Image (cartoon, rainbow, N blue to C red):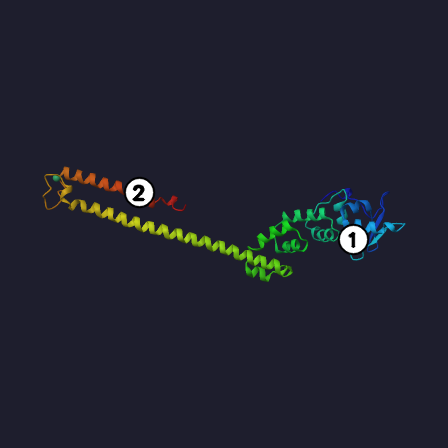
């Protein structure tokens, strides 16, 4: 909250006030020159009254809310009250009506910093706030169809905006589906590679198993024996080197069996 004493009391005239806005019998004393700086609507109104010798001294605003117009004046007079949750809606409406663009921009800047909602999208569309509109459309497309259908705010949106939301949703799902297809393809390829490596490994193991039954892999003394002689150091050493050689060829297989901590990449 700003210091209330610093806010101008518009019900009291000052030496330079030359116009009163009358709302529900209450006069608000303001300055034409100042209002004209902010609003082209007011400026035009004052210019049209120039032909009148007394000039325009009073504007009746029977359809306006005293507190809301006072708040608007606080926002454009030098006190520059901040935009907040409690004033943003009617300030948007008033600044739109009187084309007070700087206040309208401040409202938009305030809303962009707030949590996004469909209600905010309604405001963005109604008052043509482009940045906010884009910001909220990104949010709207993430809502489910049920959420959109049951939202009373959605019913206030134009069919053009609704169509765009559905269009964005379809695009989002298409991207998601493409991503899944790609991931599926990668998984299939990984699976094929693993199957191939499994077959290779099996072949290596079978090769190792056959060493003991292969006479040419024994020492010269036992080359003609019917069975492997486990007590011969030379035969065992020859087998040892053969096993090492085959295992060495199979080294590359290791990367397909990573430690559990490396599994997901
Ligand atoms: Zn031997």
Disc 1 beta carbon < 8 A from ligand 1?
no
- Mark nearer the N terminus (2 vs 1): 1
Which is more toward the observer, 110 or 182?
182
Which is more toward the observer, 227 or 191?
191
Residue 250 image position (x, y, % from top left): 27, 43
SS for dot 1: helix
**Residue drawn at x 16%, y 45% as measured from the top left:** 212
**Residue drawn at x 54%, y 57% as measured from the top left:** 169
- Name the residue furthest right: 53
Quarter the N terminus occupies: top right
Few, some or many C-alpha atoms within 10 Å of disc 2 (few <14, some 14-19, many ≥20)?
few
Look at discs 2 and 1 and give the one toward the viewer.
2
SS for dot 2: helix
Res. 129 mark: none
Quarter the C terminus occupies: top left
Residue 243 image position (x, y, % from top left): 22, 41
Q: Measured along the vertical axis of the image, is residue 204 above or below residue 63?
A: above
Q: Which residue position holds label 2?
A: 252
Q: Which residue position holds label 1?
A: 66
Image quadrant of ligand 1?
top left
Q: Check if mark 2's residue and mark 1's residue have beta carbons within 8 Å.
A: no
Q: Is residue 47 left or right of residue 88?
A: right
Residue 50 image position (x, y, % from top left): 86, 49
Q: Tag count in the figure?
A: 2
């Amino acid at each position: 909250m700003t210091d209330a004493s610093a806010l101008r009391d518009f019900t009291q005239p000052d030496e330079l006030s030359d116009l009163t806005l009358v709302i529900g019998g209450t006069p608000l004393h303001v300055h034409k020159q100042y209002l004209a700086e902010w609003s082209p609507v007011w400026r035009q109104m004052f210019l049209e009254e120039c032909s009148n010798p007394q000039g325009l001294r009073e504007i009746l605003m029977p359809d306006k809310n005293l507190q809301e117009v006072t708040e608007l004046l606080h926002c454009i007079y030098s006190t520059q009250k901040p935009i907040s949750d409690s004033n943003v809606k009617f300030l948007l409406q008033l600044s739109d009506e009187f084309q007070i663009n700087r206040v309208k921009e401040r409202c938009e800047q305030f809303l962009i910093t707030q949590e996004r909602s469909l209600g905010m999208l309604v405001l963005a569309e109604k008052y043509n706030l482009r940045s906010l509109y884009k910001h909220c459309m990104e949010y709207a497309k993430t809502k489910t169809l049920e959420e959109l259908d049951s939202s009373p705010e959605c019913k206030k949106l134009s069919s053009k905006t609704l169509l765009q939301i559905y269009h964005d949703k379809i695009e989002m799902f298409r991207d998601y589906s493409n991503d899944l297809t790609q991931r599926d393809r990668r998984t299939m390829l990984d699976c094929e590679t693993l199957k191939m490596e499994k077959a290779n490994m099996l072949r290596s193991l079978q090769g190792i198993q056959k060493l003991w039954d292969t006479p040419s892999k024994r020492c010269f003394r036992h080359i003609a024996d019917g069975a492997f002689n486990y007590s011969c150091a030379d035969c065992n050493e020859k087998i040892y080197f053969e096993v090492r050689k085959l295992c060495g060829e199979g080294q590359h297989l290791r990367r397909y069996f990573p430690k559990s901590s490396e599994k997901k990449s």
